[in-house]
Amino acid sequence: MQVLLLRYSEIHLKGANRSYFERSLMRNIKYWLTGIKFTLKQISGRYIVSDYAPELEPQIIEKLTKVFGLHTLTPAICIPTSPEGIIEECKKIEVNGKFRVSVTRASKIFPIHTIDFAAQLGGVVLDNNPNAKVDLHNYDTNIMVDIRENGYTYIGTKVIQCGGGMPVGTAGKGLLMLSGGIDSPVAGYSMAKRGMTVSALHFHSFPYTSELAKQKVIDLAKKLTGYLGDVDLYFISFTKVQEAIHRNCNNNYMITIMRRIMMRLAQKLSKDINAGAIITGESLGQVASQTLESITSTSAVVDMPIFRPLISFDKVDIIEIARKIDTYTLSSLPYEDCCTVFLPKNPVIKPTLQNVEKEEAKLDINALVEEAYATLTKLTLNLHGDN
Ligand code: ATP
Ligand code: MG
């Protein structure tokens, strides 16, 4: 029988919480594979996915590689344990180049010592693959023969990397400030990888920003569902806020003040949806609004944690992840973001809190926040939906 052997990542570190994490991971595996018929079993530190239609295997693997908390997976053949049966299976294996056989024996009932049996199986493989060569250290293929205590043996040759990290839903909820750019989707992915449930908030500036810019953000959030699961995506119109800042304040403070108002709105929404942290895609020094001084002045308006998982990342490293999670092409589409609409020529790079507050005093902040918050809308993107 064809099966998938799943190995989990850091969960074993969790001591007393272990069963909570295991249950969350099992729940997520089942949810990610909704609509597919399969059986999920746990055997000593692994999960086994079985009883699925073989032609669905590539699709199942594709989904499982995005489940956080899983470390690796191996497509394997599962047979009732017997030396003869294992030898028969090994006769069917095709290998080119250097290989080794590694036998693990959780079942001490098995009569042959693992090292002797591995050598015997290596001989069987060689007999059927004249071009192959045994190399215990520099091998291209590792033939894994895993003899478990449940009476079954699993034989596979591939180790496929999965998401790593912790199961989504085990580390509280965060509100991702999602622009249409490259960084914020990667920031959301990064926090989900640590087990956070992620909701997202986007500020748009109709009519200065287009319907296409909004659709791009929806498409980005959809892409993220593969890793995050269902995503609640919130929209707030930022037009009135930007116009008010533009009319009343020194334009060089535009971005700093915008950021501070975005943060206030993000905090307000977080409290309403029970999110315990705000997540942004900021990276230190990347642009004028991401200097230490700018970050200090934007952080000053909220009293909850702000997670900036990319703070120390170079752009090239962020792009590498964006490519891996397939958000890069979407993010690179050239639609305007609300931040670019009223871009000042000379934004302050090191705003002092005092000066920012002085500029901000020219606005009725509370009224602007309330007015903007009244435009809040929500779209739920389902992991399985066409949305
Ligand atoms: P990104 O690629 O994520 O847009 P960026 O390098 O363009 O980042 P900024 O435009 O300075 O950086 O934005 C910094 C962070 O502020 C973003 O990562 C995002 O978390 C948040 N942000 C910016 N614009 C918006 C927006 N329109 N709606 C929601 N959040 C935003
Ligand atoms: Mg941006």
Image (cartoon, rainbow, N blue to C red):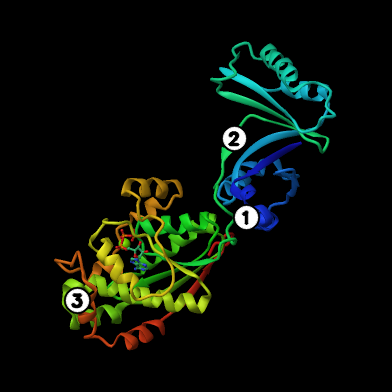
Mark closest to the chain's N terminus, 3 or 2 = 2
- Confirm or reject: label 3 Cβ below 8 Å from ligand 1: no
- Packing grade of label 1 (10 A; few <14, some 14-19, many >=20) is many
Q: Between label 3 and label 1, give the one nearer the viewer.
A: 3
Residue at point 64%, 14% (across, down) = 129
Identity, as a three-letter code, of the amino acid under mark 2: Val
Residue 158 appears left or right of 111:
left
Q: Where is residue 153 in the image (x, y as percent from the top left)?
A: 77, 32
Compute the Cα span from label 2 to label 1.
20 Å
Q: Quadrant of the N terminus?
A: top right
Residue at point 49%, 78% (across, down) = 271
Which residue is more in the foreground, 4 or 191?
Answer: 191
Which residue is more in the foreground, 207 or 1?
Answer: 1
The residue under label 1 is 32
Q: In this view, does 157 lie above or below 281?
A: above
Identity, as a three-letter code, of the amino acid under mark 1: Trp
**SS of the residue at dot 3?**
helix
Mark closest to the chain's N terminus, 2 or 1 = 1
Is disc 3 in contact with disc 1, using a CB cutoff of under 8 Å? no
The residue under label 2 is 159
Q: Tell me which image quadrant ligand 1 sits in.
A: bottom left
Residue 47 appears left or right of 300:
right
Q: Is residue 301 above or below residue 26?
A: below
Compute the Cα span from label 3 to label 1.
49 Å
Which residue is more in the foreground, 235 or 361?
Answer: 361
Quarter where residue 306 is shown:
bottom left
Q: Is residue 46 above or below residue 364?
A: above
Q: Where is residue 4 in the image (x, y as percent from the top left)?
A: 68, 40
The residue under label 3 is 355
